[in-house]
Image (spheres, rainbow, N blue to C red):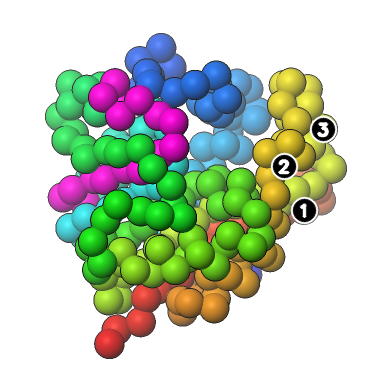
Amino acid sequence: MQQPRPREKLELLPRASYRGVNRDDPLRFYFVPFLGAMYRRRVELCLDECRGGDAVLEVGFGSGLTFLNLGRKYRRIYGLDLTSSVGEVGALFRRHGIETDLANGSVLEMPYAADEFDTVLLISILEHLKPAEQRRAFGEIRRVLKQGGQVVYGVPIERPFMVFMFRLLGYDIRRHHFSTEQDVRAAAGELLDEVRIVRLRATPALLGAVYEVGHFRKAEA
């Protein structure tokens, strides 16, 4: 396990700019003291693993928090989300010079051709699937990746401290998280080659790791 310092800073628009998400979207957490710094750091760790290329697909893009950064690394940005308003989010980033191809849908059945993406990115998405669904999700991810393409995902490592902090904000994560980081990592390893696992530690560090970033690769033929 490695824990490099994030090299990339998450670029955010003003909070009031974001559109197209429902009330359960964690957008608000990125702008609150202390917890916001941890939320941004976990995204930065994921972005550090994204190597760039022609096309990236973000599954669960929400309000498009990563799009400013991804626009500097990839020629084409695709997004898939269960509930986000693709028209509103797309229009917002078009005004900032970033064209996107966004759709509503599930990682369990993605509307894309095989061998299409250099990178598939999922930030705090896979923990919402049940353990039995993880292999199906990674089967779809593997299908849409180009040979040699990468998947980068981030999932929380549930700790009592994390549960407590979320409850202070009125959010019970136990009602939304069904898979552990071990469930996700095991499913990824069945179908893809592990590149590295990175863990984010809490502040203070004695509270242990709170987030895991997985970087896996689809083998060349």
Q: Secondary structure at mark 1?
A: loop
The answer to whether any part of residue 146 appears in the image is yes
Q: Secondary structure at mark 2?
A: loop
Q: Amino acid at mark 1?
A: Gly
Which label's residue is closer to the chain start, 1 or 2?
Answer: 2
- Which residue is located at x 26 percent, y 24 percent? 87
Residue 219 at what x, y percent from top left?
35, 82
The part of the chain drawn in magenta is: 74-89
Residue 59 at what x, y percent from top left?
41, 47
State yes or no: discs 3 and 2 in contact (Cβ < 8 Å). no
Residue 40 falls left or right of residue 95: right
Q: Amino acid at mark 2?
A: Thr
Provide the residue designation for mark 3.
Answer: 164
Q: Give the residue furthest to the bottom.
A: 221
| Distance from Cα at disc 3 to Cα at disc 2 | 14 Å
Local crowd at mark 2 within 10 Å, few (<14), some, or many (≥20)?
Answer: few
Which label's residue is closer to the chain start, 3 or 1?
Answer: 3
Q: Amino acid at mark 3?
A: Phe
Towards the viewer: 13 or 78: 78
* Label number found at residue 203: 2
Residue 191 falls left or right of residue 90: right
State yes or no: discs 1 and 2 in contact (Cβ < 8 Å). no
| Distance from Cα at disc 1 to Cα at disc 2 | 9 Å
- Which residue is located at x 44 percent, y 52 percent? 107
Image depth: mark 3 or mark 2 in front: 3
Towards the viewer: 7 or 129: 129
